[in-house]
Image: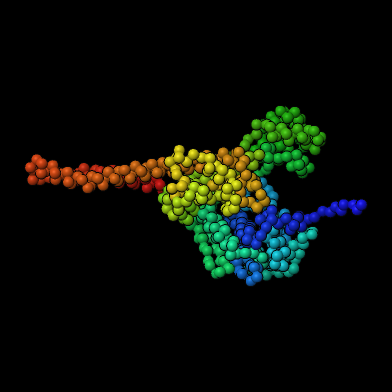
């Protein structure tokens, strides 16, 4: 009987064999995923350094279902010695820290490059500069078996204009004809959430899609923070202990965990029955396990704060929605920071009414979902947002989803978004996240209800004015004829008073709508 043969494979080889889990399961989905991943990397390279994004994307049809993509940004650029690994090694990148970013695994951009390599035998060309006097050009492939970059060509050229940014270009097998609706919708929804970005896209047919920024204001970049005690496990704590220079448990907790002060550390160690002066490296396996378990149970830790998050903000979200839909009214809210499993998150939501928003059947309602500034276009009905919308009693807010022009917007920003899949398309129904989405939407619904009530009041006043304007002259004339007086009474004073009241109500409604 032959013996079973065991072997290991590299990360690149694993994702090469299982590329469907990252959104590369067919040419249509791959076309959309490649564009999205490259654009997201470009936006992150700008926003993390408070650079107003200028992102240009061009897709060229090379025939036989092969397309060439080129994405250029004005971001911080990639250092010369990091370019081969940033674009040629799976699971290598700058995303492995506790702060909000679009990418999670250092995977998406490299998977796009790998997909182009295995479907179109294409190398990736990368031109980048950090704003110095030199530009760096690399032509790369990925060694799949060893998960290492293969450098085909590299050049260093002068950069007299001190250009800064990155240009990435490669070919891949795709199906743009069928992917086009999702691709165009992706750019449109990205522009809604990023009214401070200039985004330009040229498709294979030569059509130009241009979304110009309407504001210079940008959200505050997310900051890197330490792990929170509620969000660590045995392996993470073990790594921390191996890397720490702290000689006591109090110092270890204060220096390595988010929002843990000396008093909190001492109280926690007392409850966990671990000596405050013990050296972390001397803890045995039982003490280490007790430490981690007590961290999850102890209720004296401060909740995570939001400095590691970068929400859009109510004003920017409102501007983006108004630019795209020109609604009659839009209600926007941003919830306070909350947390699940030690990971901080913030929910922002909006409900827009009227304007260019069409009336849709209830099962085809307009719902726009975003996570860490990424539009989510697939699997709407599997998402927690849809679950929340279906369970809210909208009649309580006098909203009829089947007969009113309504659009719903939900944005979740978190250090770790609870996606259900690696493809980052829909959010799991974590109770804490579900609660925040529900109350955000209910807050917006109350605002819309109040607007509609004031609008109805204004309509009633206007109808009353119309009645006065139509019948008051007739009543005055009838009264004159009845008493035999040749001069009709002065009804203009009454009419002016009613008109002034109607105008006041109308102006008040307009101010509140703005």
Does 287 sit above or below residue 152?
above
Q: Quadrant of residue 326?
A: bottom left
Does 320 sit above or below residue 241?
below
Colouring scheme, one of rainbow, by chain, secondary structure, one colour: rainbow
Q: What residue is at 68 percent from the left and 37 percent from the top?
A: 229
Q: Quadrant of residue 339?
A: top right
Residue 428 on image: x %, y %: 62, 44
Q: Quadrant of residue 483?
A: top left
Q: What residue is at 78 percent from the left and 55 percent from the top?
A: 10
Question: Along the horizontal axis of the image, is 323 left or right of 232?
Answer: left
Q: Can residue 131 be seen here?
A: no
Q: What residue is at 40 percent from the left and 47 percent from the top?
A: 513
Residue 188 on image: x %, y %: 53, 58
Q: Residue furthest front?
A: 1
Foreground residue among 494 and 387: 387
Q: Residue furthest right?
A: 1
Residue 429 on image: x %, y %: 61, 42
- Callout count: 0
Q: What residue is at 49 percent from the left and 39 percent from the top?
A: 393
Q: Can residue 430 be seen here?
A: yes
Question: Along the horizontal axis of the image, is 91 left or right of 428?
Answer: right
Foreground residue among 89 and 272: 89
Does 1 sit above or below residue 339?
below
């Amino acid at each position: 009987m032959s013996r079973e043969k065991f072997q290991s494979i590299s990360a690149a080889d694993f994702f090469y064999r299982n590329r469907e889990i990252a959104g590369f399961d067919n040419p249509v989905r791959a076309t959309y995923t490649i564009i999205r991943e490259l654009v997201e990397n470009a936006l992150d390279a700008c926003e993390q350094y408070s650079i107003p994004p200028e992102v240009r994307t061009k897709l060229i049809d090379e025939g036989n279902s092969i397309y060439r993509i080129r994405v250029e940004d004005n971001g911080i650029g990639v250092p010369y010695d990091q370019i081969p690994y940033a674009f040629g090694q799976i699971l290598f990148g700058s995303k492995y820290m506790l702060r909000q970013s679009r990418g999670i695994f250092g995977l998406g951009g490299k998977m796009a490059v790998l997909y182009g390599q295995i479907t179109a035998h294409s190398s990736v060309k990368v031109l980048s500069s950090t704003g110095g006097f030199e530009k760096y050009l690399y032509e790369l492939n990925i060694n799949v078996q060893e998960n290492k970059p293969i450098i085909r060509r590299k050049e260093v050229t002068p950069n007299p204009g001190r250009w800064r940014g990155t240009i990435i270009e490669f070919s891949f097998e795709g199906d743009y004809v069928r992917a086009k609706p999702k691709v165009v919708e992706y750019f449109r929804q990205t522009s809604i959430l990023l009214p401070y970005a200039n985004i330009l896209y040229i498709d294979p047919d030569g059509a130009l899609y241009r979304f110009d920024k309407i504001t210079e204001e940008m959200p505050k970049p997310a900051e890197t923070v330490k792990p929170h005690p509620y969000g660590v496990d045995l392996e993470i704590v073990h790594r921390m202990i191996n890397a720490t220079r702290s000689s006591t448990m109090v110092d270890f907790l204060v220096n390595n965990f988010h929002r843990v002060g000396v008093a909190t550390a001492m109280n926690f160690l007392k409850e966990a029955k671990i000596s405050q002066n013990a050296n972390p490296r001397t803890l045995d396996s039982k003490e280490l396990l007790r430490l981690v378990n007590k961290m999850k149970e102890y209720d004296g830790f401060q909740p995570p704060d939001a400095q590691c998050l970068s929400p859009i903000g109510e004003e920017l979200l409102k501007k983006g929605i108004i630019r795209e839909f020109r609604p009659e009214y839009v209600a926007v809210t941003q919830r306070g920071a909350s947390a699940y499993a030690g990971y901080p998150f913030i929910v922002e939501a909006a409900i827009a009414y009227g304007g260019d928003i069409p009336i849709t059947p209830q099962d085809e309602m307009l719902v726009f979902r975003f996570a860490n500034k990424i539009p989510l276009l697939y699997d709407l009905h599997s998402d927690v947002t849809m679950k929340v919308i279906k369970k809210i009693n909208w009649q309580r807010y006098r909203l009829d989803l089947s007969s009113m022009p309504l659009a719903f917007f939900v944005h979740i920003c978190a250090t770790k978004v609870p996606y259900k899949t690696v493809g980052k398309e829909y959010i799991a129904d974590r109770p804490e996240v579900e609660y925040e989405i529900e109350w955000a939407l209910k807050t917006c619904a109350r605002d819309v209800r109040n607007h509609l009530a004031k609008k109805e009041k204004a309509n009633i006043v206007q109808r009353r004015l119309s009645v006065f304007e139509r019948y008051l002259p007739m009543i005055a004339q009838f009264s004159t004829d009845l008493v035999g007086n040749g001069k009709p009474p002065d009804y203009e004073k009454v009419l002016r008073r009613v008109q002034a009241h109607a105008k006041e109500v109308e102006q008040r409604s307009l101010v509140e709508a703005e």
